[in-house]
Amino acid sequence: MKIRSILALATLVFVLALSITPAAADGHCPQEGGTFTIGVDTFLPMDPNTAAHDWTFYAITNINSMLFRIESGQPVGDLAESWDITDDGTVYTWHIRPGMMWHDGNDVFPEGESREVTAHDVVYSIYRQYDDESSIMAADLRNLFVSAEATDDHTVVLTLSGPDAIMYDKARGLTFTAIVAPEAIEMYGDDYGLNPLGSGPFEFVSYSPDEEVVLRANEDYYIDPCLDEVIFRVMPDVPAAMIALEAGDIDWWGSVTPGDDVGRFQDNEDMTVLNFGCPVATRLYMSVDKPPFDDVRFRKALSHMKDGNAINAALRGPTHVKGAGTAGPGVAGYVEGLYDEYHSYDPELAMSLMDEMGIVDTDGDGLREWDGSNLEIPMFAWNSDPAPDYVAAMVDAAAQVGLTIRPEIADPGTNNARRLDGEWGIYLGQGWCGEGGTNALWGRNGWISSLGYEDEEIFDLLDKSAQNLNEEEREAQLQAATTRVAALYFEPAFGFFNIFTVKNNYVKDFFGGEWTLNLATDDHNVWINEDER
Amino acid sequence: MIPLVFGVTTVTFALIHLIPGDPVELMMSNTRQMTQEEINRIRDKLGLNDPLPVQYVRYVTNLLKGDMGISIRSRSPVRYEIEQRMPDTIILTLSSISLVLVFALPLGIVSALKRGTWIDTASMTFALLGVSIPQFWFGIMLMLIFGLHLDWLPTVGQGKTPIEFARSLVLPSVALSLSLMGLVTRMERSSILEVLGLDYVRTAHAKGLGARQVNYRHALPNAMIPVLTVISAQFASLLGGSVVIEKVFGWPGIGRLAVDAIFARDYLVVTNTVLVFAVMVVLVNLATDILYSYIDPRIRFQ
């Protein structure tokens, strides 16, 4: 079994190695032209102020320039050729790349009548996002923002009230501040998202809601994209999308691939499975401000009564990753060994903890009682795979230690409403990864604050880490916060799962997307090998 | 029509708000890693924290001015969202109904006229399969066979040229029409058999008319009335109810828009799409009533 795994891994590495050569970084494309068709499960209008969906940002980050892009976890210049930061981390000076032009051949800028993108446009875009209270600008940046100023046509000075350590976080910070043309906003107003105009490597051509978005190469971009055209095709039915991928009707499935299909595609020599790069946790939340959940022994019992790692491995298949916490392996704040220390399978310990609390079976029916009656805990989960299976596994695990869990499965909206109302029970949770996720989940006014998850020590550690530019210190603070979450809440963890996307091997020099999508940068220029298609 | 519009909008607006769940929370929370503070700020801005009667009056006032409001999920005008999908929905529905008229109607007629033969057995088996096979499964099978293995037809999307578009329409139309074909074949067969046993048909035979004239001129028009009723009812339902097929084939349709909006608690999209469905049902019923009078002149005089 072990040898087979090693062979499979070696094959994957070989296939990956084949797919990453040759790069076209110097502007030379091994093959020019062609259409790259990307399948996604949802797509929304492309206004960077309001786009709430990651796949939509795949298009936005190709239509619009950003000050910088994130490649392999590091910021690389885009519209900003370079930038300086003061030692205290409060003043950023962005040097705008000269000669970047707005897309032309549209209603705003007729063919040949475009103009250069200037620092004033960058300032306009930042204030457009900052002034619109319903925009998606992240709270950390909004709270620290003091001013943005164009000191000349090619220099922007951004002043913050304190250092922002998550400025470059893939899902927060300035990563999503796309630079828009004021003329386009003036012309289209609220309909800008239906007619996006930018200065990125691809120009917007058309948008058909729930169907497709078509982009074409921007010949005026400072890099010549190898591709002629990019199509985002909306495919809400994942099994159908997998067939379309195999049939070559889409070239890359950019949304989440189910575990079963990941295994199948790993064995398919015509396909490459790409890792999204941020393992996502599955865990339980509970009403920690209400009894018996307010007693750490009960939380601990819930954590130890189930074999979370085995459940996660069974339900996630090849996407399963052992671990606990919000940050998975390879992500800032990851704490190794957290699962074994706080969440290992130990039903005997779970039972003894409940015995100690007086949650015992007194009437001999095999069910534990609390406060004079059988303890029946509602478990809230959403109604799509694999959530109901996690609930079933918890029901079974609870029965082994004499607890009763009552499944409460509903659509995500109802499930969210129960959490916001602070309804008593346990909640299945999935999602969140990385530093941004740790802050959004466990930080002040975090996503589960309605359930009583409020701890000043954790808030303090996260606040400090969010403003600490020293990477080692920040890592230590994040790890301390993660460990404190585990020790205080014992939020029962199942483990992580990797998000995998799948591409056909004739797509070259392509490494997938991570919230944003880079198709033509200094390092990579995606091209299609038509001979292999 | 006015009471209908008022009734539909009021009931739908009330019902969708009765379902627990917050649209901003659903839209933002998981994908963008936003805190509760950020979510609350957006709710305020979108007016979702206003009392329900205030939101309703605002909606009706705007509707009277022809403004259906803004989609919470896409932040684009609801009218645009509906207008963009309506042609695709109508094309898919008409294409499916055409398949039914071309294949199921003749099959039902032949089946009735050849009752008890292998043709009858075969067509009834087909009809039984048609009403029994789940649409999503049939759609996936069509994709696997004709899209992946035979590579004859595209699995997803809409072609840009007329020929490509027609090719991309084949699989969703066939998948969508299957159950209706089964239903209409059975209905047509039983309806014709019933009419063939009536006195006036016997009289026509007794007068010495040929079988062809009796069947097609006298029996068939009367047998068409219940079939037309079924087709019109299904037509209205297909306009808004082909969600499964729209999802499987990535076909942009108004049914999918409505279902996605319900799950996203996109209140105005739900209310307005239901309103559009209601108006379409009324129009289809009106058209059916007019057709009745063409098929059976007695109805006109009644």
Image (cartoon, coloured by chain):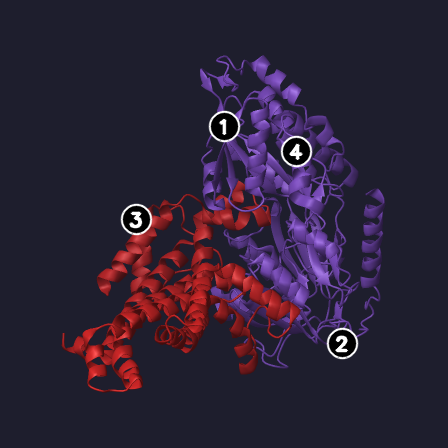
Chain colours: A purple, B red
Q: Amino acid at mark 3?
A: Pro
Mark 2, residue position: A32
Image-quadrant location for residue A317 = top right
Mark 3, residue position: B53
Q: Which quarter shows the C terminus of chain A?
A: bottom right
Q: Quick check: marks 1 and 2 in contact, CB under 8 Å?
A: no
Mark 1, residue position: A377
Q: Residue at x 31, y 63 (%)?
A: B278
Under circle 4, the secondary element is: helix
Mark 1 against mark 3, which lies toward the viewer?
A: 1
Q: Quick check: marks 3 and 4 in contact, CB under 8 Å?
A: no
Q: Amino acid at mark 2?
A: Glu
Asked if residue A391 is positioned above or below residue A349 in the image, the reply reads: below
Question: Local crowd at mark 1 within 10 Å, few (<14), some, or many (≥20)?
Answer: some
Q: Quick check: marks 1 and 3 in contact, CB under 8 Å?
A: no
Q: Quick check: marks 3 and 2 in contact, CB under 8 Å?
A: no
Q: Quote the CA–CA distance across marks 3 and 2.
A: 58 Å
Give the chain letter at badge 2: A
Q: Residue at x 71, y 31 (%)?
A: A339
Asked if residue B72 is positioned above or below residue A162 in the image, the reply reads: below
Mark 4, residue position: A308
- Image location (x, y in percent) of residue A380: 50, 36
